[in-house]
C-alpha cells in the first residue's frame, strides 16, 4: 500500500486506478493510504454537477472537461450513480465520453455506483475525490444523477455546485427546482436551443428573485448533523452570492466559456472573506463526526457478542423492549465492562 | 406527554396530529412517548409508493386510499418530500387530496419535508409510521417523490413497495427503472391510457425477465449497514416473488382493484415462510445500530469540549492531522477519562 501511495504521488495513472478500486471496495489498509495521502490534498477545485435525468449532464461534463483542458488544467471526473446499486447507468455515459477524451493523460474518468453498503457511496465519493486531489488534478468534476437527498449530500462535498436544468422535462420539474435551487452556486439551462429554454430561464429567475434569495442558506455542522440556516448576509459585509443562470448547448460546446467564467467568479467569491476556509471547516466537521459514529460503534461491537444483539432484537420484535430501551441496555453493559 | 399518548391510544385525532408534530420537530420527551407507544405497534400494513416526478403518484395514493376505505380499512398517509427542505411540494398534493378524502375519520393525511437536519427525514418518517401504527390505522401509505437513495431508504421501512412508472417521461427513464426495480414488490404503470403505455409495460417485463429476477435482492443488515445480497431463492424451498406489473389510470380509478389484489398477494407471500418476521428483524437491526451510533456520539460529546473539537478541526484543515487520526485521538481522550 505504501508503494502504491508513492507511485500515485509520482503521477502514475495505474496506481491511481488501483487505489480508487480499493477505496470503492473498502479494502483493508486503504485507511492508512488515505491518511498518507491526506497532507497532499486541498489543492484541487471540486465542482459538483447535478440535475434531473434528461438534462444532459454527461454532455455538459464532457464539454467542461474539454474546455478546462484547453486552458491547460488537468481534470478528474467522477460519475456517481446513486440510483443503481447493480447496473451502471453511469458506465454507458462513461463509454461515450471515453471516445472524446481518451488518449489524453490530463483527463481521468471514473464511475462509481453503490456496491453493497447503502450510504457508503457518499463516503466512497469523498475518499475518491481525496485520492484524485492528492494525485495532483487541478479540477475534479463530480457528476451525480437525480435530485434526491443522497445526490445533494454528494455534491455538498464540492466547492462549486452546478445545478443543470433543461426545457420541457414534464409537469413537476418545478418541484425539483424548488428543492435543489438552494444548493446551486451556478444554474445551467442546458439544451438551450430547444423550445421553452427562455421560459425555463425566466422561471428560474423568478424563483431566484421571489423568496429564494431570502432563503439562500448556509451549511453549518452541529454535532455532526448538517443544518441549514438562513444565510446571515443581510447584516454582514460579506457579499451575497446570487447564482447566475448560464445557457448552454453542451453537445455543440455553446455557452461553455460563459459557464467557465461563472465557475471562476464563484471561486473568486469563496476565496475572499475566508468563505472557502469556512466551507472546508464545515466539510471536515461533518466527516469527523461521521467517522466518530462508525468508530464508536465498532468499539462497542468488539465487546458485545452477536448473540446478545440478536437477543435484544428478538425482544424488540416481541415488543417486550423498545429500540431506545435496547440502546440503554447496551450502553450500560459497555460501561460495566469498562 | 403521557396524557397525549393515552389520548392517541384512545383514537383522538388531535393527539395524533400533535404527536406527529413533536416527532417531526424532535421535541424533548418525544422519545419517551415513542417508547410508550411501541408495545402498541406492529399491526399496520405499511405500503411505500415511490417513482419519478410526473408518474401520478399522488393520484394513485388518493385512489388507493379510497379503495381501502370502501373495504372498511382505516388509512394513514404520509407524503414525504425529500427534495425540498423549505418549500413543500408535498403540501400542494395534500390540498388536492384533502378535497376528496376530507370529512372521513378513517383517513388521516400528513406531509413531511426535511426540516433542518438532513438525513433526519428517514428517521422522522419511521417514527411517524410508528405513531400512526399505534393509533390503530390498518394501512399506512408512505409516498415519496423521486428515485434517489434517500427515497429508497424511506420506502425500505415499508412492507410492500410500489414503484410507479408512466409512459413517455423522457430519455433516461430506463436508467431510473434499472435502479429502483430491485426495491419494487409491485410495479405500477400509471396513466396507462396514454400512448406508449404498452411499451412501458413491455420494457419493464423485459427487464424483469432479463437478469433482473436473478439479481432480485434480499436486504440484510450487517453491523447496522444495510447490505444487498442476491436472494438465495434458487436452492431453497421459499417461493420467489416476481413483481407483478399492474396498469392503472388513477384519476379514473381504473386498475385499482387489480392493484389491491397484487398488494394483498404480496402480503400473503410475506406471511408464509416467516418472511415477514425476517423483514421486521432487518428493520429493527438497522434502527438499533443507527440509534446506537447517535447515542455513542452524544456520550462522547458530553465529555469533550467544543474547544477541543475545534482545535482538532483546525489541525485537520492545516493537514497536520488526518481525519482518521483525529478520531483516534478523541477515542484515546475518552478512554483516559473513563
Image (cartoon, coloured by chain):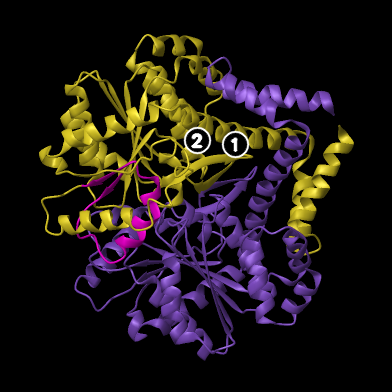
Chain colours: A yellow, B purple
The one nearer the camera, A119 or A86, is A119
**Disc 1 or 2, which lies upstream in sequence?**
2
User: B44 and A182: which one is in front?
Assistant: A182
Which numbered tag is attached to residue B307? none
Residue B243 place in picture, x, y as percent:
42, 66
Q: Quadrant of residue B133?
A: bottom right
> Going by the image, does B331 lie left or right of B250?
right
Q: Position of residue A147 (x, y in %)?
A: 38, 51
Total numbered circles: 2
Residue B316 occupies quadrant: top right
Q: Is residue A6 above or below residue B181?
A: above
Q: Is residue A193 in the magenta section?
A: no
- Tag 2, which secondary structure? helix
Q: Residue, x 66% and y 28% (percent of image)?
A: B309
Query: Which percent across, then down, holds residue A49?
Result: 32, 40
Q: Nearer the viewer, mark 1 or mark 2?
A: 1
Q: Chain of mark 2?
A: A
Pointer 1 and pointer 2: residues touching (CB < 8 Å)?
Answer: yes
Q: Which mark is residue A290?
A: 1
| Res A83 seen here | no
Q: Chain of mark 1?
A: A
| Residue B191 in view of the camera | yes
Say whether mark 2 and mark 1 are on the same chain.
Answer: yes
In this view, the residue in front, B14 or A171, is B14
Residue range in magenta is A163-189
B32 relative position to A186: left or right? right
Please say if B216 is above or below B272. Answer: above
Secondary element under disc 1, as helix, strand or loop, is helix
The crowd level at tag 2 (other Cα within 10 Å; few <14, some 14-19, many 20+) is some
Residue highlighted by disc 2: A123
- Residue drawn at x 73%, y 57% as measured from the top left: B28
Which residue shows up at 55% across the image and 64% down it? B158
Amino acid at each position: 500500500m505504501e508503494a502504491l501511495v508513492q507511485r500515485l504521488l509520482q503521477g502514475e495513472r495505474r496506481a491511481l486506478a488501483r487505489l480508487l478500486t480499493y477505496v470503492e471496495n473498502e479494502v483493508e489498509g486503504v485507511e492508512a493510504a488515505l491518511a498518507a495521502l491526506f497532507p497532499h490534498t486541498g489543492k484541487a477545485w471540486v465542482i459538483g454537477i447535478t440535475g434531473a435525468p434528461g438534462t444532459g449532464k454527461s454532455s455538459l461534463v464532457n464539454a467542461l472537461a474539454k474546455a478546462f483542458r484547453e486552458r491547460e488544467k488537468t481534470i478528474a471526473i467522477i460519475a456517481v450513480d446513486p440510483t443503481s446499486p447493480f447496473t451502471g447507468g453511469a458506465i454507458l455515459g462513461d463509454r461515450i465520453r471515453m471516445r472524446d477524451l481518451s488518449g489524453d493523460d490530463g483527463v481521468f474518468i471514473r464511475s462509481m455506483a453503490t456496491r453493497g453498503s447503502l450510504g457508503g457511496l457518499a463516503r466512497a465519493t469523498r475518499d475518491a475525490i481525496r485520492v484524485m486531489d492528492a494525485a495532483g488534478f487541478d479540477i475534479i468534476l463530480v457528476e451525480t444523477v437525480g435530485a434526491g437527498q443522497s445526490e445533494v449530500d454528494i455534491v455538498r462535498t464540492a466547492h462549486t455546485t452546478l445545478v443543470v436544468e433543461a426545457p420541457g422535462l414534464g409537469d413537476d420539474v418545478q418541484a425539483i427546482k424548488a428543492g435543489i435551487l438552494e444548493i446551486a452556486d451556478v444554474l445551467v439551462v442546458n439544451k438551450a436551443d430547444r423550445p421553452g429554454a427562455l421560459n425555463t430561464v425566466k422561471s428560474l429567475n423568478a424563483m431566484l428573485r421571489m423568496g429564494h434569495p431570502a432563503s439562500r442558506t448556509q451549511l453549518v455542522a452541529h454535532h455532526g448533523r448538517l443544518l441549514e440556516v438562513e444565510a446571515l448576509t443581510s447584516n454582514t459585509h460579506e457579499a451575497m452570492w446570487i447564482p447566475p443562470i448560464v445557457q448552454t448547448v453542451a453537445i455543440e460546446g455553446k455557452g461553455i466559456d460563459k459557464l467557465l467564467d461563472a465557475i471562476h467568479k464563484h471561486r473568486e467569491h469563496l476565496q475572499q472573506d475566508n468563505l472557502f476556509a469556512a466551507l472546508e471547516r464545515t466539510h471536515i466537521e461533518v466527516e469527523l463526526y461521521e467517522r466518530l459514529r462508525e468508530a464508536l460503534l465498532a468499539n462497542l461491537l468488539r465487546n458485545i457478542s452477536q448473540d446478545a444483539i440478536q437477543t435484544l432484537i428478538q425482544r424488540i420484535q416481541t415488543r417486550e423492549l423498545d429500540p431506545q430501551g435496547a440502546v440503554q441496555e447496551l450502553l450500560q453493559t459497555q460501561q460495566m465492562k469498562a
